[in-house]
Image (tube, grey):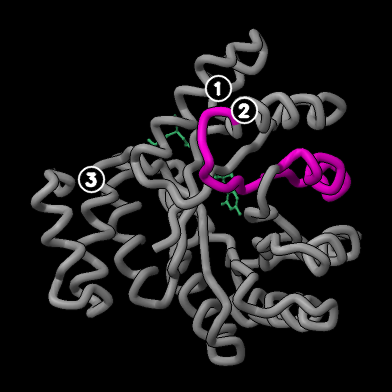
Amino acid sequence: MIIIGEKINGAIPAVGQAIARLDAACIRDLAIRQTEAGADYLDVCASGAPELERNVLAWLLEIVQDATDVPICLDSPNPEALRDVLPLVKRPGIINSVSGEGNKCEVIYPLAAESDWKIIVLTCDDGGVSADAEHKAAIGLRLLGKAEAYGIAPDRIFIDPLVLSLSVVGEALLSFTQTLRQIKANYPTVHFTSGLSNISFGMPKRKLINQNFLAFALEAGMDSAIMDPTDKVMRAEIFAAEAILGRDKFCRAYNKAYRRGALG
Ligand code: THG
């Protein structure tokens, strides 16, 4: 399971405030805590005013890269901002994200083609985010084909089938797993990720929903998540689910996690 730590995001109120008062210690602490919790990548997202985004990202990247060697998952809806700050990142990580919207692929794919950066590809386009699995899979397949045309191998792509909120779309999980399976049938080496807490937006006891979503999504083939790596309950859930799914030989990782007290 590839864990992308979500905590350095200006959309989280406490982080937005830390950015506003240039509180480097707060950002540094988030980077270190997620690193110690075993994050494979650290998502870095400015949010806030678009005209400040490049400066905020540059500031965040300097602090995070000084605090940790964990690779960055560079998160922005603006392809030009991603392009402009990419040279500030010391080693290739994940670009988050492209989609079928506007010129995103045309800006980002050439940068990835001539480097080792991986890319998260969202299954939406100028028509917006669909709940229909066929439609989402068609967008994903088209964007994977386009990546191949640029010389980007499918195993460098993370498809994010954009989980909708269960409180709005009752079939949110089914739409996610059907999209995933259709794409995987054509591209068996592609990775799949998602924001782990999207499913429970607007619901009480969100972690209960998130945990169950995780188990079903892992079974369907999701092999990455954008999540809080310091959430011990969720980390324990991942060890349990991977053992149950036969992806943990002799339950070695599960038992090891138990011995170091990581299962709670
Ligand atoms: N897909 C892709 N990128 C994404 C998202 C996605 N980037 C942004 C977002 N969604 C994922 N990041 C976050 C960051 C923080 C929270 C949710 C998603 C969040 N954090 C609370 C906090 O830190 O206070 C609560 C954390 C918790 O209790 O677990 O809500 O979908 N490609």
Q: Position of residue 15 (x, y in %)?
A: 55, 22
**Which residue is pictured at 55% across the width and 77% down the height?**
179
The amino acid marked with disc number 1 is Val
The residue that label 1 is drawn on is 15
The amino acid marked with disc number 3 is Val
Contact, mark 2 vs mark 1 (Cβ under 8 Å):
yes
Q: Position of residue 166 (x, y in %)?
A: 44, 56
The residue that label 3 is drawn on is 233
Q: Earlier in the sequence, mark 3 or mark 2?
A: 2
Label 3 and label 1: CA atoms lie apart by 23 Å
Say left or right for 191 vs 214: right
Q: Earlier in the sequence, mark 2 or mark 1?
A: 2
The residue that label 2 is drawn on is 10
Q: Which residues are magenta?
A: 66-89
Badge 1: few (under 14), some or many (20 or more) residues near its Cα, within 10 Å?
A: some
Which image quarter is the C terminus in?
A: top left
The amino acid marked with disc number 2 is Gly
Q: Is residue 241 magenta?
A: no
Badge 3: few (under 14), some or many (20 or more) residues near its Cα, within 10 Å?
A: some
Q: Secondary structure at mark 3?
A: helix
38 relative to 125, above or below: above
Q: Position of residue 107 (x, y in %)?
A: 89, 58
